[in-house]
Image (cartoon, rainbow, N blue to C red):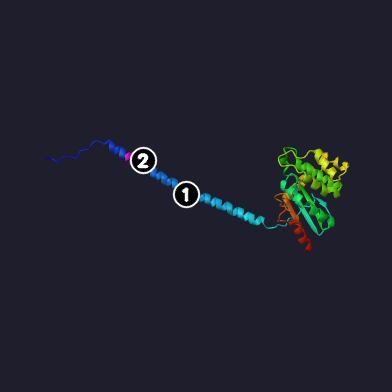
Amino acid sequence: MSKQEPTRQPSDPTSKRQQLRLEQEQAAKEKRIRNIITYVAVGLGAVALIGGIIWAVLTYGSQAAKPIAVKVNTEYTVMAGKADAPVIIDIYQDYICPYCGQTERANQADLAAMVASGEVAVRIHPMNFLDDASMGTKYSTRAANALVSVAKAEPDKMMAFNSALFANQPEENTTGLTEAQIAALAAQAGVTQATIDTFASLSYADFVTNSTNAAFTDGIQSTPTVLINGTQFEGNLLTAGPLKAAVQAAAAK
């Protein structure tokens, strides 16, 4: 009998289905592995990014906490008190800035008393970078223009008018006080009608813009910022007492 050649068996449909299933399972397994690797890589990248952000925030915070000396531009300021006072306080403020209002209301009595005693001179740096927060009326510019007008014409009324503006401070994202309301506050502070009549011309609007630009150039980053003899005060501005104590300490040096 001759040797029988092996025969080729017909394909088994069940075997094909099993093979296909095995291939699909292997492909799914490989996909899961690739996904895990991708997620881990992304996760590590996110952790690194978050860590970098935290480091930057902590670094900035530690730097911001250190008092800084500021080269003060005095060209666009108005002053209350004697220029040769032993302590000069520089206040950078915007008339619609809520924290500026809190600062003024907390420290107004102390500042007025120290100016009156000759211990302190206060230089105000009026700013208008929050003009957009008054619904198109440019309240920051209008209020600051009025303050500068009073400071130039009747400097002895400046502090009282400044306090009146903050005592009646409008909220952000409102239209602010009207021209008539600003005029009424000036009159209450003892400003003459002749000076009040100049408010509408906005003669010092450019002065206020220049003051704002000079402040930013000098490194001022927010309002209120208060300097004592050129060094930034880092204490609590929103409560009466800390600023006065710092001024007295500076005067004693």
Q: Quick check: 41 above or below 179?
A: below
Q: Quadrant of the C terminus?
A: bottom right
Q: Which of the 4 image quadrants contains residue 19?
A: top left
Residue visible at 33% across and 42% down in the picture: 22
The secondary structure making up most of the magenta span is: helix
Q: Earlier in the sequence, mark 2 or mark 1?
A: 2
Q: Quick check: 198 above or below 66?
A: above
Image coords of residue 185 (percent x, y): 82, 43
Q: Which mark is residue 40?
A: 1
Regarding mark 2 in the picture, which secondary structure is present there? Answer: helix
Closer-to-camera residue (3/149)? 149
Regarding mark 1 in the picture, which secondary structure is present there? Answer: helix
Residue visible at 36% across and 43% down in the picture: 26
Image coords of residue 107 (percent x, y): 77, 52
* Residue 245 visible within the image: yes
Quick one: label 1, few (<14), some, or many (20+) residues within 10 Å?
A: few
Q: Which residue is mark 2?
A: 24
Is residue 179 covered in magenta?
A: no
Residue that lies at the very extreme toward the left in this rendered image: 1
Image coords of residue 210 (percent x, y): 77, 46
Image coords of residue 171 (percent x, y): 72, 42
Q: What residue type is disc 2 on? A: Gln
In 3D space, how far apart are the residues under numbered discs 2 and 1 (Cα atoms)?
A: 24 Å
Is the residue under label 1 in contact with that under label 2 (CB below 8 Å)? Answer: no
Quick one: label 2, few (<14), some, or many (20+) residues within 10 Å?
A: few
Q: What residue type is disc 1 on? A: Val
Residue 191 left/right relative to 100: right
* Residue 206 visible within the image: no
Magenta-colored span: 19-27
Q: Quadrant of the N terminus?
A: top left
Is residue 25 covered in magenta?
A: yes
